[in-house]
Amino acid sequence: MRNTLIYVIDLPESEDLVLLRRQAQELMRSYPVDYWREKDRNREFPKEYFEAAARQGFFGITVPEEYGGLGMGMEAACAAMNEVSRQGGGLPAGDVLMRQLVFGGLAISRFGTKEAKEKYLQALVEGKILMAIAHTEPNAGVNTFAIETKAVKKDGGFVVRGQKVWITLGHLADLVLLIARTTPTDPAQPKAHGLTVMLLETRGNNVRAFPIKGMSMRPLTSTQFYIEDAWVPEENVLGEVDKGWDVLKHVFNAERLSTSSIALGCGEYALSAAVRYARERVVFGRPIGSNQGIQFPLAQVYAELYAAKLLLQHAARLFDSGRDCAVEANAASLLSARASFAAADRAVQTYGGMGFAEDNDVERFFRDVRLFKTGPVPEEMVLNFLATRALGLPRSF
């Protein structure tokens, strides 16, 4: 049975975004919380949800109308990701949208060649292509400039060889946003020089994927890639060769906004579940929610979620206006990760022993939102960025 939740954090939004949220709510009525519980339990990809989201146009939010999309921006994408997450779909429901909307629609629309746009965007909107991103490597970690995967120019394209890790949905993805080194590092050049972003087709292209069973996001699964002389045609390069960092900065800002939206949706779900339980659960002759020991932590979580959501909205509007939003997007990701984890942790505590039961779902949200404090980038690295970029302090790494 679907949980009846109390949605407490709704910000002023345009009529288009309000309508988009309503459409997301309608979509999620067919995929209630017990659907996601079973997908989590079985580590099974939510194929039915993916196909329904495609049919209803959600994968086209960031794709221009000429390619079958809606031609909307990141604020709209964030609204959709937030809504499906807080409607009970949690991290997996929101993350599926992020793969398509950011690593697919936004990246290809803004940086792709005419050939790539024509080849991939319409198929992406229709759900015929599943996207992933291959950035992290075993040795480089989150240090993009230390990437070792190589792409060697040859006969109108590139031959790619290397290893990637923690690729969500890598085992199912048809198309991967890949970051590779096309020119060796040179002390005389900026650290970012020599990196190139390209679209790698995985089917029959010398790409082997091995699943990594993890604590979070179990329906989607992360993988490790072994790329052995895979072929990427030159029209699949996004932006300019050797100047991939210009593309990545844009994509990473959009990713920060996306994960913030999903985290906040998860936090709102967890808070609403805890509030409902606190109202209904009677101990010593009265609802546990009448005790300040229960009330105050929930009120604190509400305030933290609200503040993070306001910052996210501001950052998304900066992004859509074409202004630099790196500081705001990173700050939003930090606060959203912390607020959502606090909400899930407090939900488990409010439920008491029952918070550890799978059928109450808060344990699943607790497992999933822990990811946001570590990935896609650790909060320590976010703090490093804010210290240097916003405060002007010396680099610590």
Image (cartoon, rainbow, N blue to C red):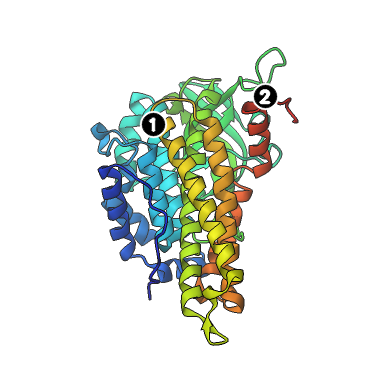
Across and down, in percent, residue 295 comes to 55, 67
Q: Where does the N terminus fall, quadrant-wise?
A: bottom left
Q: How many marks?
A: 2
Across and down, in percent, residue 279 comes to 47, 75
**Picture residue at 62% right of the left edge, 22% below the top:** 192
Disc 2: CA contacts within 10 A as few (<14), some (14-19) or many (>=20) = few
Across and down, in percent, residue 269 comes to 46, 62
Q: Secondary structure at mark 2?
A: loop
The residue that mark 2 highlights is 392
- In this image, 10 relative to 92: left or right? left
- Which disc, if any, is residue 374? none
Across and down, in percent, residue 296 comes to 58, 64
Residue sitting at the far top: 188
Picture quarter containing residue 22?
Answer: bottom left
**Picture residue at 52% right of the left edge, 48% below the top:** 170
* Amino acid carrying mark 2 in the image: Gly
Report the mark closest to the observer, 1 or 2. 2
The residue that mark 1 highlights is 320
* Amino acid carrying mark 1 in the image: Asp
Q: Secondary structure at mark 1?
A: helix
Q: Where does the C terminus fall, quadrant-wise?
A: top right
Residue 183 visible in this rendered orientation of the protein: yes
Earlier in the chain: of badge 1 and badge 2, it is: 1
**Picture residue at 53% right of the left edge, 49% below the top:** 168
Q: CA distance from mark 1 to mark 2?
A: 26 Å
